[in-house]
Image (cartoon, grey):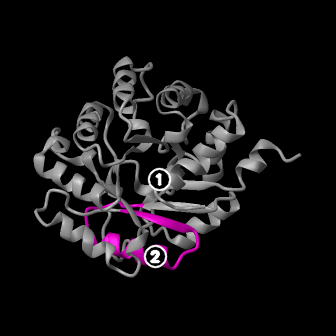
Amino acid sequence: MPSPDVIAALDLVDAHQHVWDLAARPQPWLELPGHEPLLRNYTEADLRRAAVAAGVTATVVVQTVTDPAETTDLLGLAAGSDLIAAVVGWVDLAARDVADQIAALAERPDGRLLRGLRHPVLTEPDPDWLARPAVHRGLRAAGAAGLCFDLIVPAEQLPGATGAAAACPGVTFVLDHLGIPDLDRPLDELWMHDVREFAALPNTACKLSGLLGEPTARLIPYYETALAEFGPDRLMFGSDWPVCTLTASYAQVLQAARALTSGLSQVERSAIFAGTARRIYGLGG
């Protein structure tokens, strides 16, 4: 009989990865200290070599900059790829014409591949950005168009994420990178409380991503909290490639996720490694 890992690999979705071309547009965040090794192009071909070798059957590519041209480029890239199955793009959620922007993307020949939006909330100088009425209007427009919203927020902004999710029940909010807990500190009771508050809302989900290059033992309490609060049907694997390569290879990240989930049933692991992402991002399969 095949091992559990072999069975799990039969359908394996990476719900969070990036690509960029520095000649097409700058990536200012790559100039931050510690990101210097990422200052080169990362292409679909680079992703394919790592993902296919790991047995990945589909991926979700996620925006990196607040440039609408990046979203259209990602849609075109996904349309020509049998690996990238969905795009999480960017529009100006606070713009008065946000619904028109979303509709224009949807009307493109490749617009069917736009399955979500994201905004780098963690870089916003306004800590209450997620509470702005204009942002809520944009989020509701996204939900009306069938799009989810990926949340990239630091741990201290988790209450704001919960407030936005409560105010916009027609939108599915996906928490990236477990809400970015500080792994250098003892388990933060406030982070645990805020994650529980967020997960208590039915229109929320979470990505086991962005942290998988850290020692697995340090991740266990955060993973166990997320698993307990979201359950396998609202938790999904994401590599955060190529950012993950600062600390681990693609294969090592996937192995860490498999080690963390090794105590689950095959049905539960299948949800985390494929089913949740396929349902939330509408990937089919």
Q: Position of residue 18 (x, y in %)?
A: 45, 61
- Amino acid type, callout 1: Val
Q: CA distance from mark 1 to mark 2?
A: 19 Å
What span is colored magenta in the figure?
62-88
Quadrant location, the C terminus: bottom right
Name the residue carrying label 1: 243
Q: Is residue 196 left or right of residue 92?
A: right
Name the residue carrying label 2: 77
Mark 1 and mark 2 in contact? Answer it, CB < 8 Å: no
For the residue labelled by badge 1, is the local secondary structure a helix, a strand or a loop? helix
Q: Vertical placement of 108 versus 280: above or below?
A: below
Name which of mark 1 and mark 2 comes first in the sequence: 2
Residue 253 visible in rendering: no
The quarter holding residue 165 reads top left
Residue count near mark 1 (Cα–Cα under 10 Å), binned few <14, some 14–19, many ≥20: many
Which disc is residue 23 wearing?
Answer: none
Front of the two marks 1 and 2: 2
At a point 32% along the width and 63% down the height, the residue shown is 27
Q: Position of residue 63 (x, y in %)?
A: 36, 61
